Amino acid sequence: MIESLLEPFTYNYMTNAILVSALVGGTCAFLSSYLILKGWALMGDALAHSIVPGVALAYILGLPYVIGAFFAGALAASSIMFVKKITRLKEDTILGLVFTTFFAFGLLLVSIKPTAIDLQAIILGNILAVSDSDIVQLVFICTTCLILLILKWRDFMAIFFDENHARTIALPVGRLKILFFALLSAATVSALQTVGACLVIAMVITPGATAYLLTERFHKMIILSVFIGTTTSALGAYLSYFLNTNPGGLIVTLQTFIFIVIFFLAPKHGVFAQRRIMRKQSNNSALPYGDNITSLPVDNQSIFSTNTGEQK
Amino acid sequence: MTDGLITMKNVSVTYPGGNVALQDVNLTLHKGTICGLVGINGAGKSTLFKAILGFETPSNGEIRIAGNTVKKALKRNIVAYVPQTEDIDWDFPILVEDVVMTGRYGHMGVLRLAKTKDKMAVNEALERVDMLSYRKRQIGELSGGQKKRVFVARALAQSAQIMLLDEPFTGIDIKTEESLITLFRDLSANGTLVFVSTHNLGSVPRFCDEVALLNRTILAHGPVETTYSQNNLIKTFGGKLRHHQLFGHVLHDDADTRGVTVLTDCERPLVLYGEQGGQKIVRMPEQDTSHESESPPTPQEDKEEKPTEGGF
Ligand SMILES: Nc1ncnc2c1ncn2[C@@H]1O[C@H](COP(=O)(O)OP(=O)(O)OP(=O)(O)O)[C@@H](O)[C@H]1O
Ligand SMILES: [Mg+2]
């Protein structure tokens, strides 16, 4: 029994896949805590799509595709910021505008040189099929991201909470924002390989959204989110061995499952908790009234009985 | 010209849409003073603060803070700011004490790890605004006035040499207003420059040493006793002031020709008394009427009216 449970670990590629998935899942989850608070949830999706032309171009030029992806992502993010600064268009409009443009350009490139690129690998991703050199890249990217995030999480929090105040205390807001987008692009590229372009968005939203239901302090939210992201990703990769499924689909399904459980059970913001609070409130307001009902009749009876007794 | 803590020379600010909000502003403010900033809606009070903070870049002129450029001054943590409205996400998972702690970031190392000194500053700041017992509340779970007090505490925690407060009295009860005024006095006694915009015309003589009257440009600036005159105020507000004058013949039957002028922008009125409608500011008594005398029936009477309770 135990032997069969440990069986995936006897294969090198499985062990690698599980560990790398955990690392990627943790990094994306860290970023998700920020994204969901800023209403930037779709940013991850936008970046994942924007990366496609970069990947295509890198394939055509024979460069490691992480580099192409990263530059395309950075370019997309900075165009989004640039357009936002100049016009008054809403963020979602700009996101939609920029990422469809990039994605269209990517498809164009792919159709020009169709054989050079395995588009399936980009769109669906499969951590079980990632080469060793890619794994080295992934580990390097994610570790760097995590270190930078751990060093700067408070500064990012200050900016995401109150950008104007961050300026008055002389945080380098512009530079930190660029750093954040660079980290996000890097994490998106990594997630691309584990779960594919379509599911990246789940990796950078769901863990944060789940953690948000559980706490009112930001550092706890990050810790919970990273925990959820790491465990679900590792577990997803591990289970895919037995179920013989696409690991990306499994990881995201697990994350959603946890979200649903928390959604009902969370101590303060969950469905049941809110019901409980409502009930408690109505009980509280009914309390003095209830007391009267139970005590009054007794008193009245005794009063009446003595009264009537005396009168008689 | 570097003797002032803030020196503005021929400063003009134009918004992107072409609105000229400030034109040729010349203003020098010194340490240890409380200066009131008074003007109609749209006079440019908030813009003036934003220019001092570098949020709006002057199209013309120069601003120096303690001899530095604005950018350097912010780096050196010289300026703290309480904005008129906070444009933030009230659902952000952050507690009151964490918000106030962000005010300390400028004093901390790269990792923003709070030392005992920082924790003490946060406690003290919360204590000063009477919000210590709310320290563990999530920021959105406060009333409007309480939120405002938290942001004052955040600015206090910064221990800056200059405090800019944009209408701190709006939406705040009288007790809090009194304690804020005491706070400003203490700060200025310790050498802080407190620069406060307000619509409470009557409060200005009660707590300001100096007053600056603004309408796109500084119309007058100087000690309250001389500058805060009826003529200057009418120049600043034009016809937009509620304005009542009562002269000698209405007030009494003798030959005394002195009159009373009541000027009010919105809340606390300014009362002037003397010849030609008044040269002298009548200071409202410290213990304001609204404290005690207005509270309707006294508690004793209340009790006497309900003697029946024990009768059952
Ligand atoms: N973001 C902006 N873009 C364009 N014009 C602006 C902007 N903010 C303010 N203004 C204009 O600049 C002028 C000064 O505005 P400001 O907010 O400084 O006034 P204020 O004195 O603070 O008024 P209030 O008493 O209402 O707070 C106004 O005419 C206003 O319409
Ligand atoms: Mg204003």
Image (spheres, coloured by chain):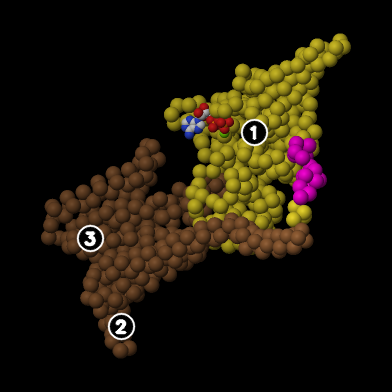
Chain colours: A brown, B yellow
Q: Which of marks 3 and 2 is nearer the N terminus?
A: 2
Looking at the rendering, the stretch of residues picked out in magenta corresponds to B291-308
Circle 1 packing at 10 Å, graded few (<14), some (14-19), many (20+), is many
Toward which corner of the image does residue A238 lie, by quadrant?
A: bottom left
Using the image as rendered, state which of residue B85 and residue B296 is in the foreground. Answer: B296
Depth check: B31 or A161 in front?
A161
Q: Which chain carries label 3?
A: A
Residue A302 horizontal side relative to residue A239, left or right: right
| Residue receiving disc 2 | A9
Indicate if the residue with disc 2 has its beta carbon within 8 Å of ligand 1.
Answer: no
Q: In which quarter of the image is residue A199?
A: bottom left
Q: Are marks 3 and 2 on the same chain?
A: yes
Q: Residue B268, image x and y in percent?
A: 69, 31
Give the residue at x 40% y 40%.
Answer: A85
The quadrant where residue B271 appears: top right
Find the distance from the CA under tag 3 to the CA under tag 2: 27 Å
Asked which secondary structure carries label 1, the reply is loop
- B294 part of magenta stretch: yes
Please tell me the numbered disc located at residue A123: 3
CB under 8 Å between callouts 2 and 1? no
Quadrant (top left/top right/bottom left/bottom right) for the C terminus of chain A = bottom right
Q: In which quarter of the image is the N terminus of chain A?
A: bottom left
Q: Which chain carries label 2?
A: A
Nearer the viewer's eye, disc 2 or disc 1? 1
Residue underneath mark 1 = B198
Who is closer to the viewer here, B161 or A262? A262
Q: Residue at x 64, y 34 (%)?
A: B197
| Callout 2 amino acid | Phe
**Subunit that carries the residue with mark 1:** B
